[in-house]
Amino acid sequence: MSRSSLNNDIILRRLRASQEYDHRRYQEYFFEFGLLALPPSSSIPQVYLEHIQDSCNKSTAIYSITPRPEPHTDAYCRDVALRIEIIFLIYEQWFRDHNVDIDFGNFVTKFIRIETSNDEQHQTIENIIKIHTAWCEHVEISLPLCSRKKDSTGAEIDDPSFEFHGCMGINRRQAMFYKLQPLFRALILVVDHRASSGAEKLVHLVRTNTPSKLSAPIDFDSISPKLHSDMFSGHDKDNVVTTTLPVAIDFVTREERFSREST
């Protein structure tokens, strides 16, 4: 193709295709190789700033409660394969209706693993909520660190647009567009590893009841099917619902859309 035949439409389509590729690659990285791992307590360890920005503009967090597998083992390969399968399922479903919403890390969920020992695998809903609340507070406190640096006079330093703080880096120049969303505070998903098999992945939707700026309470009545699981037996069922991963993602995207339209 000659240079003269490259009209604006072709250039824009190529640019858009490149942006869509980068967005998917970015999300897959945080699910597959750059996942955020937190201890089974509300004590947040030091993490790369890329995890701070990657928690922004997400509708919710999806938690996996598993021990950290040893590298180069069957358990390690199964763990990576599961995360790859989850991101593939989620991304294809989300992208169909949100292919214009790919700026500034916008996506439906942030993947977080709570790394437990074999004796600590059973976590209560209350403990998971405490960990999530602590992470949200850590993100809010750390967000200013992602902004552009200033010199001794207070003037912004003309640093590169992206800075590597982790493998993917952070976007300092446009840091003001990265915000922790109200729904991210109020709603989380938890993978049910014991019940998930084959193509059907089960998750628990959990209302955190953490104060947020949502315009209306989260209502689980519309979720169908509601499935049984004994992963969190004895917990208040009004705040926990078990369903399939696709149904959960549809619910989260509807809640996010309603939240944005109401503000």
Image (cartoon, rainbow, N blue to C red):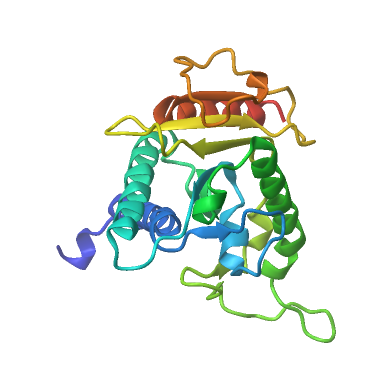
Q: Residue at x 45, y 41 (%)?
A: 100
Which one is in front, 198 or 109? 198
Say if 186 sits above or below 43 in the image: above
- Residue 156 lies, in percent from the top left, at 74, 77
Say if 130 sits above or below 177 in the image: above
Which one is in front, 25 or 10? 25
In which quadrant is the C terminus drawn? Answer: top right
- Residue 46 lies, in percent from the top left, at 65, 70
The count of marks equals 0
- Residue 103 lies, in percent from the top left, at 51, 51
Q: Give the residue furthest to the front.
A: 119
- Residue 244 lies, in percent from the top left, at 41, 26
Say if 43 sits above or below 245 in the image: below
Report if residue 118 is visible in the image: yes
Q: Give the residue furthest to the right.
A: 153
The answer to whether 113 appears left or right of 71 in the picture is right
In which quadrant is the N terminus drawn? Answer: bottom left
The answer to whether 72 appears left or right of 28 in the picture is left
The answer to whether 167 appears left or right of 233 in the picture is left
Which one is in front, 138 or 164? 138
Q: Residue at x 51, y 47 (%)?
A: 65
Q: Give the residue furthest to the left.
A: 1
Q: Quadrant of residue 89?
A: top left
Report if residue 12 is visible in the image: no
The answer to whether 106 appears left or right of 215 in the picture is left
